[in-house]
Amino acid sequence: MTALGGRPDRGAALFDLDGTLVDTNYLHTLAWWQALRQYGHIVPMARIHRAIGMGADRLLDAVLGSERRRDEDKSLSDAHSTLYAVWYDVLPPFDAAADLLRAVAARGWRVVLASSAAEEEVAAIRKRLDAEDVITAATSGGDVDTTKPAPDLVQVALQSVDAEPADAVFVGDTIWDIEAAGRAGVPCVGLLTGGWSRRELEDAGAVAVYEDARTLLRHIDSSVLSRPPA
């Protein structure tokens, strides 16, 4: 495959999933809220929402504190996964999410799904997105020991297509995406569909912020995704 203008395909466009391509952040919030209540932890949904985008280990630190009973972690995570799985067949992609991936691929980027979600959740989202023809690679939380906002997941995503940070762009919806990308040396575009404000995403270091996937698609040729690095 060659990039627009005949350049070899070398760029990597990394996409978060939850809150970026699929409207699931609040479903995750609800599932975590229910899972925590099953084990006697009454946590406001607002606090849980602010931790969505982290891996389960980091999220539990954020909502319960680092001094929590860690022997509950697996049970809590399993309960969340079971509660969330009821939504697998109806996970709602954002308007134009698949069109955005195809437009990015048409401009010479390799599309990589860079998610810390469980492997089965990533598979469910890919089925709902229906954009397999342009997805080059994908990650899941099982690919790393340390999740966002650590840079490990971004680095693994880059390695999956043999790309350098200078050849990549990350698209995400939370400050945890932006921090992880920044620590890996990758610029991050923010979308407002995850429930974070424009100011918060910009302050975290987003190079640009768009309303949603459709808005980014509409402005793609004036964005950092217009074409891969020369």
Image (cartoon, rainbow, N blue to C red):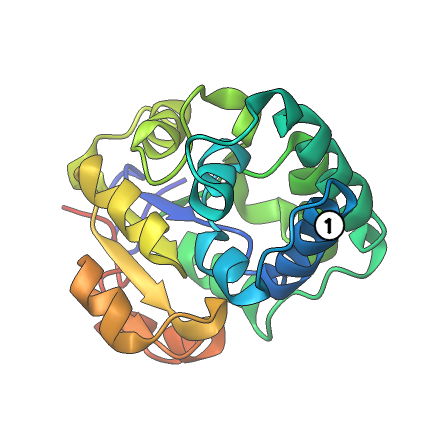
- Where residue 164 sits, quadrant-wise, is top left
Label 1 CA crowd tier, 10 Å (few <14, some 14–19, many 20+): few
Residue 171 seen in the current view: yes
* Residue 14 point in image, percent of width and height: 39, 45
* Residue 52 point in image, percent of width and height: 50, 53
Of residues 119 and 195, the one nearer the viewer is 195
Identify the residue at horizontal 36%, vertical 56% (top origin). 171
Residue 130 seen in the current view: no
Identify the residue at horizontal 61%, vertical 46% (top origin). 133
- Where residue 62 sits, quadrant-wise, is top left
Q: How many numbered circles are shown?
A: 1
Identify the residue at horizontal 45%, vertical 37% (top origin). 61
178 shown above or below 163: below
Q: Amino acid at mark 1?
A: Arg
Of residues 76 and 55, the one nearer the viewer is 76
Q: Which residue is mark 1?
A: 37
Along the horizontal axis of the image, is 24 left or right of 31? left
Identify the residue at horizontal 23%, vertical 75% (top origin). 199
* Residue 35 point in image, percent of width and height: 73, 46
Along the horizontal axis of the image, is 202 left or right of 3? left
* Residue 68 point in image, percent of width and height: 51, 32
